[in-house]
Amino acid sequence: MGIEIQADALARLRERVQGTVYLRGDEGLAAEVACFNPAIRHDPDVVVAVADESDVAEAVRFAREHDLPVRVQATGHGSESPIAGGLIVSTRALDSIVVDAPARLVRLGAGVRWAPVIEQTAQYGLAPITGSSTSVGAVGYTLGGGLGPLARTHGFSADWVRGFRVVTAQGDIVTADADSHSELFWALRGGKGGLAIVTEMTLELVPLTTLYAGSVFFEGDAIEPAFRAWVDWAAGLGEEATTSVVLLRIPDVDGPPPPLRGRTVLSVRFAYPGDSATGERLFAPIREAAPVFLDAVAEIPTTAVASIHNDPEQGSPSWIRGFMLDDFDAADGDTLLEVAGPRVDSPFLALEIRQLGGAARRDTPDGTAVGGRDSGYTLSAIAADPTTFDSAAPAAAEALSRALKHRVSAVTNVNWASDLSDPSTFESAWPAPVYARLTEVRASYDPDRVFAFGPS
């Protein structure tokens, strides 16, 4: 659009919205769309920092009028590639939280992070099924499915969604739930993007106040026997508990807990939503596997759920590659140790395996678009040294992928997928029938592809 037309159009848009409109070059634009990963920097033509859902509708209509592709960002935690051009709708100011305790529901705005939802619902003895990090935006995470520390006992976070308020590609505000726009409701639970802009989400809560949960750490010669023990133990663990393991090469810098700085450690995470005596018995084989360096598994309130994974609350430059695995056995564990274990010069700050199965494998009675339910594990490789991002980290991840190629799942959940601009990667984020149905829903609700998502 021409400069004069652009100026007039932007002036009219600013008159119609309660929020703030930024044009490329305006002071404040970069801060509004800053990402959790500072290595990713967006450069949109226009940003609309919305104050309410009416602003979202105005932004979408403006984008349609001027042929601007629309993308959405709340917290910026999930951004994996820079956005160039187009219009970004920033929903971070949509931060309302309304708890309906008798109905065991919470209604939350599109900009809300998990932490305040957990705090407010805990006052009623209730809890949402969240992610491992409570600084993540609840809506963006859930749209992809959402695998948290209770995945085996309670499934994907998307399984607990009971409705959305959205703005469609035509700029209409509608409700999508089991009774209204049910096909869109199905798609939004796991389909991630290219469907509508969510302004509000309603979740069912679970009656839960405490967990027997946390993580234990092993260092030095204890790492490999503890890891091998975890592989065998996890394979026989019932779905009453959820576990994951991560090999961490922690730099000696401010930020990590002082006892862990400058160390290579293995952290085994555990979450059992039940009594401490049973939880302690279930977790005993890990404590007995090797000398424990630090032990932080105990009864905790649900408000301390973030302590299970101890994900960083402040962003730093990072490079991430994710896979889903059909299974993972002792031989695979040996392979992983050979390729990226503690004795290997690896570029990865963290190498994490999460066990799936249990409730995560079962779809809801009405069905969702969540991909990756059939996998048994996830594998994530994270590098934090920017000098490794172009070559060393991708090469090491590729070596890992080759070594475990017999285990890598045909479907990788969209929240774990790497380059969604690649057609084959995008298509493999869902089982073929789900992908086909999602394609139809996207074509129905956004025939003009107003919402930029996936391959162009």
Image (cartoon, helix red, strand yellow):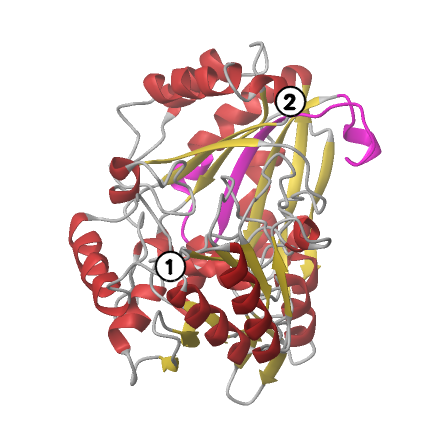
Residue beneath the point at 35% across and 69% down = 169
Answer with the quarter of the image where residue 252 lies. Answer: top right
Give the x, y percent position of residue 97. Answer: 62, 77
Relative to the observer, which residue lies in front, 136 or 268?
A: 136
Does residue 251 show up?
A: yes
- Residue identifier under label 2: 385
Residue identifier under label 1? 67
246 vs 113, nearest the viewer = 113
Range of the magenta residues? 233-262
From this view, report whether residue 435 is shown above or below residue 275. Answer: above
Q: In the drawing, does residue 206 fall left or right of residue 28?
A: left
- Residue 55 location (% of width, % of height): 54, 75
Considering only vertical position in the picture, is 272 above or below 202? above
Q: Is residue 200 visible?
A: no
Judge left or right: residue 140 versus residue 444.
right
The quarter of the image holding the N terminus is bottom left
In the image, what residue type sits under mark 1? Asp
